[in-house]
Amino acid sequence: MADRQASEASYGVTQLLIRFIVGGAVVSLLAALGDAVKPKSFAGLFAAAPSVAMATLGLTIMTEGKLFAAVEARSMIFGAIACFCMQPPPFGW
């Protein structure tokens, strides 16, 4: 019983470490990409949302499988489309 609890705790710590490492690397990469585009207000958007999504999908594939992750990815895509559709048109249009 104690071995199982220790194993589950170790698995949880491993998941957190993977999430931190993958998330940090993707945030850094996408922040650099966001810094290259204009306007600079998009930098935070490019850094945060995709990195969280990628880390979540990676862990979901590891724990739940590819089919569950595919449904999750499709939901993320529809959510991104909905957010885009809710934005007012930029000035000058």
Image (spheres, helix red, strand yellow):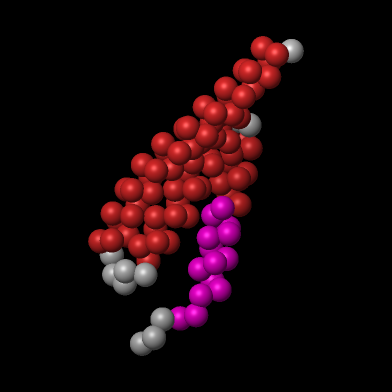
Q: Where residue 86 sits in the image (x, y, percent)? A: 55, 73
Magenta span includes 93: no
Going 60% across and 45% down the picture, which residue do you hit?
72
Q: Where residue 92 sits in the image (x, y, percent)? A: 36, 87
Going 45% across and 51% down the picture, which residue do you hit?
50
- Residue 40, placed above or below residue 28: below
Going 63% across and 18% down the picture, which residue do you hit?
6
The quadrant of the rendering that contains the C terminus is bottom left
Q: Which residue is outermost to the front?
A: 2
Magenta span includes 83: yes
- Residue 21, placed above or below residue 35: above
Give the quarter of the image for residue 89.
Answer: bottom left
Q: Nearer the viewer, residue 68 or 19?
A: 19
- Residue 14, placed above or below residue 91: above
Q: Where residue 24 sits in the image (x, y, percent)? A: 39, 43
Give the quarter of the image for residue 21.
Answer: top left
Task: From the viewer's perspective, tell me whether residue 8 is left or right of residue 62.
Answer: right
> Most prominent secondary structure in the magenta stretch?
helix
Magenta part of the protein: which range? 76-89
- Residue 9, placed above or below residue 83: above
Q: Which residue is outermost to the bottom?
A: 92
Task: From the viewer's perspective, tell me whether residue 91 is left or right of residue 12.
Answer: left
Going 62% across and 17% down the picture, which residue do you hit?
7
Give the quarter of the image for residue 78.
Answer: bottom right
Q: Nearer the viewer, residue 27 or 71?
A: 27
